[in-house]
């Protein structure tokens, strides 16, 4: 397989996240509206069914699914075993995210859900600003206002970069110029936590919604060993420079155990939701 850049990997991950949500949206529309006895919907059910099947077809041939299934199949198999291994955590999809129409086998649905967790990890560690409207509330980003001294140094940096022939720093230069010109008066969002912590936070919040985790004694958490392997995958992909161990992962999970906040990637369009109350 040709070498893939970090930006290409980020774009594939984001595209898969959108495909996954597209499936959920069409499934919800088909199930919820078609079962509403107070509305005549029979003439639309055929169209909704077709849309749902089309969305399933799109996600099954997703380039990100193909990438994970070919280049990282061993890692994916390990993660799946950790989530449903003997004497360990038993993990299944939440019924809200299960294909009740029988279009896909349960194991394929579950596999796609786990691949979503990997895609979400890639996005939140590489580009958390992509979901910035929710990231402040989640404690992932914080707002910082650049002061005059920062703008002064940005101007000096912009001048230095301009004088350096052949230096290419991509979109970073345009951001420096914008800051140097004093056009950034609002607060800038910057990551609060380390990239590894953002991944663990996202997967934990995701597991609270998408998966049901249990063991023999009580309601459990998403397998810590599975998260550890996802971090290792992201390190192999070049998204993470450093991984954290089992104990650190467990500590983050424990803090989020009763947190019912939506994961950042549940808002793929980065819409600033307004509280109706």
Image (cartoon, rainbow, N blue to C red):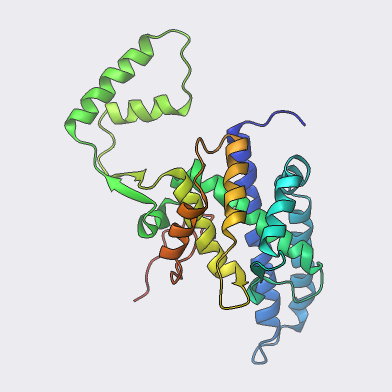
Q: Nearer the viewer, residue 186 or 168?
A: 168
Q: At 35% from the left edge and 47% from the top edge, which residue is drawn?
A: 192
Quarter of the image with the N terminus is: top right
Q: Position of residue 220 (x, y in %)?
A: 56, 71
**Residue 265 appears in view:** no
Location of residue 111 by image quarter: bottom right
User: In the figure, is residue 7 to the left or right of 198?
Assistant: right
Q: Nearer the viewer, residue 52 or 123?
A: 123
Q: Position of residue 147 (x, y in %)?
A: 19, 35
Q: At 69% from the left edge and 86% from the top edge, which residue is drawn?
A: 35
Q: Nearer the viewer, residue 208 or 30?
A: 208
Q: Residue furthest bottom?
A: 38
**Residue 124 appears in view:** yes
Q: Is residue 226 above or below residue 45?
A: above
Q: Residue furthest left?
A: 148
Q: Position of residue 152 (x, y in %)?
A: 21, 24
Q: At 27% from the left edge and 27% from the top edge, which residue is drawn?
A: 181
Location of residue 103 by image quarter: bottom right
Q: Is residue 216 above or below residue 149?
A: below
Q: Position of residue 188 (x, y in %)?
A: 31, 42
User: In the figure, is residue 213 to the left or right of 46?
Assistant: left
Q: Is residue 236 above or below residue 47?
A: above
Q: At 78% from the left edge and 62% from the top edge, which residue is drawn?
A: 108
User: In the figure, is residue 111 to the left or right of 269?
Assistant: right
Q: Residue furthest front?
A: 87
Quarter of the image with the C terminus is: bottom left
């Amino acid at each position: 397989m040709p070498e893939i850049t970090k930006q290409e990997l980020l774009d594939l991950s984001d595209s898969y996240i959108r495909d996954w949500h597209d499936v959920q949206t069409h499934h919800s529309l088909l199930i919820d509206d078609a079962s509403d006895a107070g509305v005549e919907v029979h003439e639309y059910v055929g169209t909704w069914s077709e849309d749902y099947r089309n969305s399933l077809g799109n996600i099954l041939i997703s380039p990100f699914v193909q990438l994970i299934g070919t280049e990282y199949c061993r890692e994916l198999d390990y993660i799946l075993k950790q989530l449903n291994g003997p004497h360990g955590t038993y993990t299944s999809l939440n019924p809200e995210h299960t294909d009740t129409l029988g279009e896909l086998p349960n194991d394929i649905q579950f596999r796609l859900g786990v691949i979503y967790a990997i895609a979400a990890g890639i996005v939140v560690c590489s580009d958390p600003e992509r979901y910035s409207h929710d990231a402040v509330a989640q404690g992932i980003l914080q707002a910082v206002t650049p002061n005059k001294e920062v703008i002064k140094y940005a101007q000096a940096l912009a001048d230095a970069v301009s004088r350096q022939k052949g230096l290419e720093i991509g979109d970073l230069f345009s951001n420096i110029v914008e800051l140097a010109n004093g056009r950034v008066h609002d607060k800038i969002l910057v990551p609060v936590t380390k990239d590894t912590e953002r991944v663990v936070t996202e997967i934990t919040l995701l597991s609270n919604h998408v998966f049901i985790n249990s063991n023999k004694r009580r309601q459990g958490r998403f397998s810590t060993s599975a998260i550890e392997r996802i971090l290792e995958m992201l390190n192999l992909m070049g998204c993470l420079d450093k991984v954290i161990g089992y104990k650190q992962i467990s500590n983050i999970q424990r803090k989020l155990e009763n947190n019912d906040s939506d994961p950042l990637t549940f808002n793929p369009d980065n819409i600033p939701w307004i509280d109706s109350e």
